Amino acid sequence: MSENKTPLTEKEEENKAEQTAAEEKGTTTAEPAKAEKKTKASKRKKGKKGEKPESEMTEEEKKEAEKKKKNKPKDAKGSAKRLIGYITKQKSWLIVVAVLVVLATVVTVCSSLIMKPVYEAIESVMNKGGDPNAEFTKITRALFAMTLAYVISSLMNYAYTRIMLSVSIKTLTNMRRELFNHMQGLPISYFDKHKTGEIMSHFTSDIGRVSDLVQSTFVNLISSTIQAIVTITIMVIYSWQITLTITVAIALMMMTVFLITKKCQPLFKKQQETMAKSNGYIEEYVRGIKIVKIFCHEERTKKEFAEINEEYRRVGVKANIISGLMSPIMSMITRINYAVALAIGASLVVKKKMEIPKLITYLQYVSGYGSPVASIASSYSTLISALAGAERVFAVLDTPTETDEGKITLVKTIKNIMGYDEEDESGEFSWKIPNEDGTVSYVPVKCDVNVKDVTFSYVEDKTVLKDVSAHANSGEKLAFVGSTGAGKTTITNLINRFYEIDRGEITIDGINIKDIKKDDLRSSMAFVLQDSKLFVGTIKDNIRYGKLDATDEEIIEAAKIANAHSFIEKLPDGYDTMIRSDGINISIGQAQLITIARAAISGRPLLVLDEATSSVDTRTERLIEIGMDKLMQDKTVFVIAHRLSTVRNSDEIVVIEDGEVIERGDHKKLIDLGGKYYQLYTGAFEMN
């Protein structure tokens, strides 16, 4: 009988071919394979048990799921190992602490055994007619032994507590020092992306959590673990039958610890992150308090902080409530366990299989063994919180520092018949270039700067500078002007290698700046920025920051160059006047004059002025310009300015708009050109 067959589609032919191939290899057929694929696809769609598929989630649910994923510790075990590595740097003291903790714990636990003779003596007098005087002597000896045991244990506790306090302080000192030192090597881009308050929280709250762990929790975990082991061992020796029946309770305790710990880990990490966010907001608010008050945004600021603070409260309460469940759950299990042990023990006494003194002593351990287990459990919340803080600190320590492949250094030399000799005192700056044959060459520093076809972007696909070129010969003054955000300051950030260029090159004296060590490159430059940064200390110390070995005479001379000497002398303590945080006790203009004096004293051959006179009045600006003329002698100068009156006498002016050079020339040439510079200078651009 003939059979009509429908022609197979292309897809069916592929499936049949797959099935035939599978049969030939002895593997499963195509249908199970399809079923397996379907199952995997279903799993991918549904996600984890109890979770909605992503396609069915609302935007809020998606954000919440993303937060949960973010807050899970990435490597709790790795953080714990690294933290232990810091603690074990004082291994000898830790061994002493461990020995003292073990001895103190064993003495404390075993001191309860001394009570057994007391119970036996009482039973002997009450039930067996023993001699009261003789039994009283036994009781006195037992109580004396117990008192002695507690005294010895207390002394040991005092000793290891003092030692651990010292270990803790040294550990935290090492962590803070390493964190601070590591931050000195981080690129500027890291500080652009993180708020000051958030960075400060690493030194305060995060390391503070670690401090709690090292000072108390570490010892508590050892002590409680030893106490639990010794207690359960004694219980097994006294009555393995009863102990066997209560192992279920121990299992329940361990399960409780595991479940609560798993739940608390992401919450404590979130708590640390929220605290950092709160610190960042407070720091930003304190710095901008004048602006907040000027625009009457106090209520808005209160509301924003209340939201951040509420988030911290909510996360903190949730984390601590969940971790706080551990103690009552442990207590409940212990009490139920005590009742079970008492019932079984009583039946053994009735059956003459156990004596009353032995049962009473055993019950002491039954009621007490829950305490170390509960203590271990409660320590886990501190441990988890500390690991969350440590993980955040280690994340900073794992952030790559600035790479520096430069080999050329900056030295001071004196030229002689044979060439150059290095001389730190009276020498002139030179570039020290190592040659392949092991010799070195010296190139006098003239600061002939060439920016050639430089392209740069802070963020990928968002170009800030595009094929920018500029050149300044030694001793020349080069100015960059343009609208706000045109890319002027970015050029100076690239010259000192705060950021690496994407394309093109920058050379100084014909040397690519990538071949110069960053510290030496920056040591050839003096900067006066728009934001004058002063440190807490005297005016003298702030000027000396430009040259740490400067004499008082050099400081005064630098202040005279910057025209700061006259106002400094009028202050109550003159050069010894203390500057408070960020120079809040002097005017902005005076602070800028001090930073200019700091640049003057450094004696560096390349000078960068980024809006250096923007914070001073016209008269002071003129005085600074007079001082700058002295300061700029034999120096290459880069000037960035909005006030174009400060760039008129520049050798060349480069006009930048949208990251591109649109005009270049001296002041007269650009005015005659009548282009963008002319518009900026005359104000026509602003009027349009």
Image: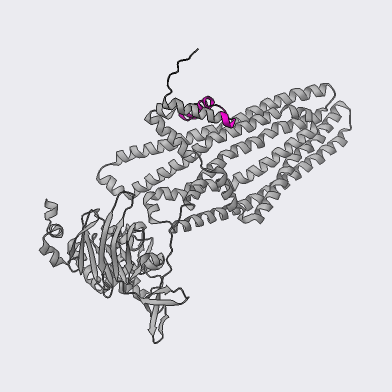
Residue at the far bottom: name it. Answer: 417
Q: In which quarter of the image is residue 681?
A: bottom left
Residue at the far front: name it. Answer: 1
Q: Residue at x 60, y 31 (%)?
A: 256
Total numbered badges shown on the rendered structure: 0
Towards the viewer: 677 or 464? 464
Q: Residue at x 64, y 33 (%)?
A: 254
Residue 527: x, y in percent? 32, 65
Towards the viewer: 127 or 324? 324
Question: Dominant secondary structure of the magenta stretch?
Answer: helix
Q: Tell whether 49 sits left or right of 186.
A: right
Q: Tell whether 448 sits left or right of 242.
A: left
Report the coloring of the rendering: one colour
Is residue 29 shown in magenta? yes
Towards the viewer: 27 or 167? 27
Residue 103: x, y in percent? 73, 47
Residue 237: x, y in percent? 80, 34
| 473 w.r.t. 403: above or below | below
Residue at the far top: name it. Answer: 1
| Residue 284 appears in the rendering | yes
| 166 w.r.t. 363: above or below | below
Residue 189: x, y in percent? 38, 53
| 338 w.r.t. 306: above or below | above
Q: Which residue is drawn at 29% across and 71% down?
A: 448
Q: Tell whether 440 sits left or right of 358.
A: left
Towards the viewer: 471 or 523? 471
Is residue 192 shown in magenta? no
| Residue 545 appears in the rendering | no
Residue bounds of the magenta highlight:
23-47
Q: Quadrant of residue 446?
A: bottom left
